[in-house]
Image: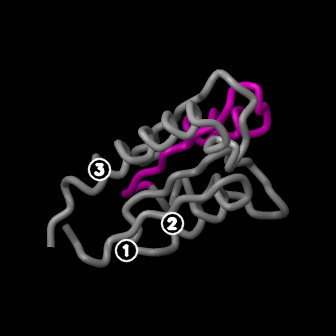
Amino acid sequence: MLDNAIAIIGASIGSNLALVGCAQDELCVTAIALSPGLDYFGVKPQDSVVEGLAERSALLVAGQRDRASADAIRSMFVAAKGKVGAEMFASGTHGTDFFGTAQNREATMGLILTWLEQEFAGIED
């Protein structure tokens, strides 16, 4: 594995920043976005997902009843050129609330760790 390879994880507006930041950093292997939106305070990640991450990957996570994030994930997933995983929880959970209960925390952490293990598995020096 590359010693300097990174992943960026964010929640809510931080998820948009994670997607944009990963697209702009050649050391970034993958971004994980909890509750991304199409436009949080002017941070618009769709172009980053479509173009900037075309050679990398992103995991997009939202609650189905968090309409803005669920709609954003659908839009980005359909438009993406690179590897994009999407997970919709049957909830209205948003952002860091994915870690709010033991059940949500366990499911979210399992998803994140599995994704990271998979994305970093094939990286060599």
Query: How would you rate the neighbour count of disc 2 (Cα within 10 Å): few for under 14, some for 14-19, many for 20 or more?
Result: many
The span picked out in magenta is 54-80
Give the vertical position of 41 relative to 4 (above or below).
Answer: above
Residue hosting label 3: 117
The kind of residue on which mark 2 rests is Ala
Q: Nearer the viewer, mark 3 or mark 2?
A: 3
Residue in the image at 66% along x and 58% along y = 16
Outermost residue on the right side: it is 41
Quarter of the view holding residue 17:
bottom right
Give the quarter of the figure containing the C terminus. bottom left
The kind of residue on which mark 1 rests is Leu
> Residue 105: x and y, percent?
55, 40
- Name the one closer to the observer, 79 or 69: 69
Residue hosting label 1: 27
Residue 105 located left or right of residue 83: right
Residue 23 marker: 2
